[in-house]
Amino acid sequence: MIEAVRQALAANDHDSARAALRRNWLRLILESNTSELERLCVEHPEPHDPHVLLIRACCRDLAGDSYGASFLRGQGLRVASDDFVACFTELLLAPDTPTKAAIADRAREALAQCGPEDDYPSALFLLGWVEVRLRRDPAGAIALLRSAVDEARLHGRVETLRLARSNLAFALTQAGVFTEAEAVLDALPADVPLTDWDRFEGGLPAANRGCISYWRGDFDEAVALLEGAVVEGSVGTNFEALARLYLVMSLVSLRREDRYFGAAALLQGVSTADKHGVPWDLLRRVTSAWLAHAEGHDDRALTLAAPVLTRAGAPVAHALLAELYRRLGEPELAANALRLASSVPLPRYAHASTLVTSAALLSSAGRGAQAHEQLDRALDVAAPEHVLAPFLADDATIADLLEAHLSHGSRHSAFLHAVLERRERFSRRLAGIFTPRERDVLACLRTTMTADEISSHLGIAYPTVKTHISSIYRKLGVTSRRAALLAVDAR
């Protein structure tokens, strides 16, 4: 494809060069090297052609240059007349959710009118990719990506097929269809060299599996998977950013106090602006509020979370926020967050979370019968995909409610027993082996601080710091800082 454009340019066959670029640009963006594609655009006999400018804008966006992409997009849109090129570059580049949603509607019409010069398989994939992120019709987004998988297979598009399958797995994960998502992930080819699109998306398979592990209550496995997806200096608006968020939530669930300092740094790498329809700022705020609560800073948690109640359209964020407000003793705010979560279609795991939160709120309000009704609904939603995380809270209200529900009777008694067994193991795990002060010292050992600097940082005497370090080493059976951190991470 690249070679066809290059040969036409070398032969000064401008019409052929324009046609080859027009026919292959979207596939090249998905499958090839965007820097080379952009170089061909610059060498094009008409580098200021609106289509060429828009294609360059896509290349810039994938390279992480949002400013350059915005300028080129503006230049191209002033005179662009071709609906297909303008529509599908805009589908990728549109800066905000309402604009992207309107363009997605236009893209459906453009797909229905595709001509032989248009790249239907790539365009179908891109529309499905966008619809997953818009979250307005999860079932429709899954159907689009299934079609993209079929089209890529029929046209022999090996790379597009891989990307379509990978994003289908993400769509299924986001909808809470974990078992099928795992089957799709298992079928993906292994050890594939990273393409520009892979870097643009940011570690999709590992992030996907980590999300599933988190919601199934396998927090240690989630940490191991999600750490592998984190890349220093990432753009903060892709799957790598999602991995950061779920990694922090997993560390909070495990009460890994020794890693909270690093968790806060992880959140700094998540965008504070929306992109591709994803409300990154809301997700970051909710996760930051959970971390603040875990650190004992409840006033800060409330401050961080407050703006999240002013926007709808982020069901997972609002489901997690509702449970946080309940833990903070704010039932009215929790109810507001539950209403926002329920204002759009909820994925299975978020639905289970809202039902558990609702049950706990009803129980605290003395409405036991209704609490058990909600809890049984939560078990009904969670059981098919083994969603355990919402039931594992280290919280007396939920613990008592689950124990009472066992004698109360449930049509999901087998799953309820699995929940209680996991809770017991999890509670033993959270009891830990370190004192609170040892956990403070252990957190400092993850930094470059010396023992003397740790003494100043924590406000305790230097000999006391040395005593805590010796105790940590003894409990872990190690003799060095590095070995201690490796041992803790392996627990």
Image: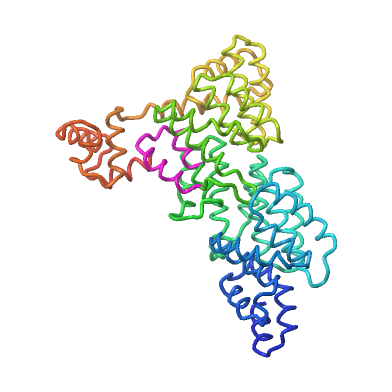
Q: Of residues 388 and 98, which is closer to you in this image?
A: 98
Rendered view: 151 above or below 116: above
Quarter of the N terminus within the rendering: bottom right
Quarter of the C terminus within the rendering: top left
Question: How many dots with numbers?
Answer: 0
Question: What is the x, y in percent for residue 373?
Answer: 68, 17
* Residue located 68% across and 90% down the image: 11
Q: Of residues 435 and 45, which is closer to you in this image?
A: 45
Rendered view: 399 above or below 12: above
**Residue furthest right as drawn:** 113
* Residue located 41% across and 41% down the image: 264
Which residues are the magenta region?
246-270
Residue 138 location, quadrant: top right
Q: Of residues 309 and 7, which is closer to you in this image?
A: 309
Q: Is residue 25 left or right of residue 283?
A: right
Question: What is the x, y in percent for residue 256?
Answer: 39, 35
**Residue furthest front as drawn:** 78
- The colouring scheme, among rainbow, by chain, secondary structure or one colour, is rainbow
Q: Is residue 252 magenta?
A: yes
Q: Is residue 138 left or right of residue 278?
A: right
**Residue furthest bottom as drawn:** 11
Question: What is the x, y in percent for residue 367?
Answer: 63, 10
* Residue located 67% across and 14% down the image: 370
* Residue located 53% across and 24% down the image: 325
**Residue furthest top as drawn:** 366
Rendered view: 231 above or below 470: below
Q: Is residue 285 left or right of residue 350?
A: left
Q: Which is the main secondary structure of the residues drawn in magenta?
A: helix
Question: What is the x, y in percent for residue 39?
Answer: 58, 76
Rendered view: 207 above or below 148: above
